[in-house]
Amino acid sequence: MARVPLETLLARVERIRPLPGVARRVVALVEDDAASVDKIQAEILKDQVITARLLKLCNSAYYGFPRKIGAVSEAVVLLGFNAVRSLVLSLGLKEIIQAPLEGYSMAAGELWRHSLACALIARRIAQISGYADAERAYTAGLLHDIGKVALDQFVRAEFGEIVGRAGSGEKAFSQAEQEILGFDHCQVGKMLLEHWRLPAALVEAVSLHHRPSEAVLDPRLAALTHAADGLTLMAGFGLGADGLAYKIDPAALEKLGLDTEKIETLLGTVPDLVGGGLRAYED
Amino acid sequence: MRIQLIEVGECAVTRQPDLVLETCLGSCVAVALYDSGAGTAGLLHVLLPRMRSVSMETKVTKFADPGVRILVEKMEEAGARRDRMSARLAGGASLLEAAGGFDLFQIGTRNAETAREMLGGLSIPVVSAETGGHVGRVLRFHVGTGRVTVRVIGQKERDL
């Protein structure tokens, strides 16, 4: 048993490369209802790399706008504040989660593939199930496994023990993490997002993405993050050593009005939905 | 050695001997077909067992039915003979079953069953398979030799 002391974990969380400033500031502007086209454009323009990538994405086949988007302000007007927040956050996150995660046996870029796939599926589930803020659903999907970045080195140290416990087919991988390390990647994700000062409902959805029935602030957001993660794992995007060793909560699916037929239809849309999204973000 | 990634729902047939087809599997099932006489290899990545309706579908090879039939037809068009084809299967994992159960967990199992059923209907033998469980897998298909390997993520690669 090698339980990780809380101070050690917090120190690790603080050493994780933070989201780029532009992403944090755009999220804050939109979350605080302080956004305007000029303010968002001004923040984005401070980061030349993000500006160039944002315009490239908006002009990609994935968005399919009939004319060329030449200015950030045009993109903000056309897409809306919430969608631009999602884009900037995605571009910022992509930069910091590219490294391989040896503890989870994830090659370079696999966590990004998993995160973007989950975000796109979460947004689609939000649209299908009538959840009002589809972009918040996207964001929760995008960030749901961020805790793995900070927990990776500890999982690597106890890999055999954790996989041994989770390999029985009865216990979820996160439960094995909890038993051996004293923390699972969901709790560590919560610490990281609190450290980044992201909104409480979002933090809750990430921290409870494997136990959505415990959510109180926004139970549907937690439920759809949970469902989106399950479908992402099933479709095989960014799988790690934890594989599919997680339980799906039928109550979460019921809360979203997802029956077997709807889920199969949704899963059938995944190749185009996720394939197109991943291509759009390629450098 | 060149690696070509086969994404979810894709179907590829090739005779290029230096090529390795690779695909990553959760509850999806990979169907690897080989005709050693013609040196023709085909790989199908099945996402769902059966197509529910024909309308609006852009990529029908994501379904075991009709994907397996399309794969075999493409193999034949590329010079392979059905009576020389053999199949290997991998994937079809499931999420853990929660209390109360839910049909969702059966998609992986049904993918594998439907693929086997389709191959049986076309008289193509399944010579090796590794399906089920709760793990992610990576399958590699070496076109030049017909060798197929599977690696459970986090474990070592082995021949299928």
Image (tube, coloured by chain):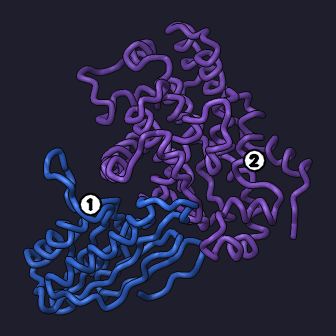
The part of the image, by quadrant, that contains residue B105 is: bottom left
**Distance in Å between CA atoms under marks 1 and 2:** 36 Å
Q: Colour of chain B?
A: blue
Q: Which chain is purple?
A: A
Q: Which mark is residue B7?
A: none
Q: Residue at x 37, y 53 (%)?
A: A260
Residue B151 appears left or right of A183: left
Q: Circles 1 and 2: CB distance less than 8 Å?
A: no
Looking at the picture, which amino acid does disc 2 mark?
Val
Residue A206 appearing in the image: yes
Looking at the picture, which amino acid does disc 1 mark?
Lys
Q: Residue furthest front?
A: B100
Q: Which residue is mark 1?
A: B62
Residue B49 appears left or right of A21: left
Give residue B136's position: percent from left, percent from top.
50, 68
Instruction: Please rate how many residues cluster around mark 2, counting C-alpha atoms within 10 Å: few if below 14, some from 14 to 19, many from 20.
Output: many
Q: Residue at x 71, y 44 (%)?
A: A189
Q: Chain of mark 2?
A: A
Instruction: Please rate how many residues cluster around mark 1, counting C-alpha atoms within 10 Å: few if below 14, some from 14 to 19, many from 20.
Output: many
Give residue B83's position: percent from left, percent from top.
12, 91
Give residue B144's position: percent from left, percent from top.
29, 85
Q: Which residue is mark 2?
A: A188
Q: Chain of mark 1?
A: B
Rendered position, B86 above or below B2 = below
Q: Residue at x 65, y 49 (%)?
A: A211
Rendered position, B74 above or below A210 = below
Residue A281 appearing in the image: no
Give residue A215's position: percent from left, percent from top.
66, 38
The part of the image, by quadrant, that contains residue A108 is: bottom right
